[in-house]
Amino acid sequence: MLPHFAKPSRKGFSFFGLLITAAVLSACQTTGSTSPGATANATAPQPATAGPVTAEVVPAEVAQPAPQTAARPPQPVVTAPPINDNPNQLMGLDRDSLAALLGQPDLVRREKPAEIWQYVTADCVFDVVLYDSGPAYRVTYLEARNAAADRLEPRPCLNQVLRNRMAAPIS
C-alpha cells in the first residue's frame, strides 16, 4: 500500500509524481560549462522569452587577494626622562635656587627664623624648611606626607613635584 502522499489525486498526478518530474527537469539544466565568449554575456540580464526557462550561468567569484600594507616600524616606548629626585640635592639651597629647581611653592608659611615652602601633588604634600642663615635662607629640612598627614618617603613625592614642574606650562 502506498503512503497517503503518494496516492494519485483526482487530477491524475500524485505528489510523488510531481517530485520525480521536478528532479528530471532539474537534471536537464546546464552544468555551468560555457564557452569563453559566453561568460561575459552570462552575467547580463536576459530578456524575458516565451520559450523554455533555462538556468542563468554565473561564473564563480574570483577571490581577490588581500590588499598589501606596509608594516609600520615599531613605535618607541615613551618613558619618562630620568629625574634627579634625590632629596639631598635640596639641602643648603637658597630661595632662588630652590625656586629654580621646584618652581614657586603652593604655600609659603613664615615663622621667624624659618620659612616652610609647601608643594602639593595629587598623592602627597612636600614641605621644604628654609632657615635664616645670616645672608640668606637655606634649606635645612624636608618632609613628605599624604593627605592624612602620615609621613612618607620624600623621594617619590619629590619625583612627583619635579614631574609636575616639567609638565606645567611655561609662562
Image: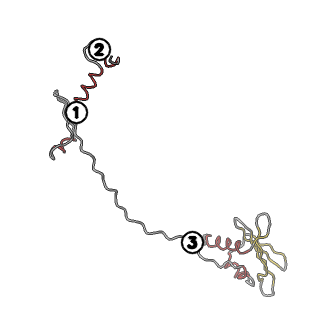
**138 with respect to 35 (left or right):** right
Amino acid type of disc 1?
A: Ala
Please name whichever residue, 59 or 116, is drawn nearer the observer in this view of the structure.
Answer: 59
Residue placed under numbered mark 2 in the picture: 9
Please name whichever residue, 87 or 34, is drawn nearer the observer in this view of the structure.
Answer: 34
Residue 15, compared with residue 157, is above or below; it is above
- Residue 102 in percent (x, y) is at 68, 76
Quarter location, residue 97: bottom right
Amino acid type of disc 2?
A: Ser
Residue plotted at (50% across, 71% down): 76
**CA separation in Å, label 3 and label 1:** 71 Å
Residue placed under numbered mark 1 in the picture: 27
Residue plotted at (26% across, 45% down): 60
Residue placed under numbered mark 3 in the picture: 79
Amino acid type of disc 3?
A: Thr
Residue plotted at (61% across, 77% down): 82
Name of the residue lying farthest toward the bottom:
135
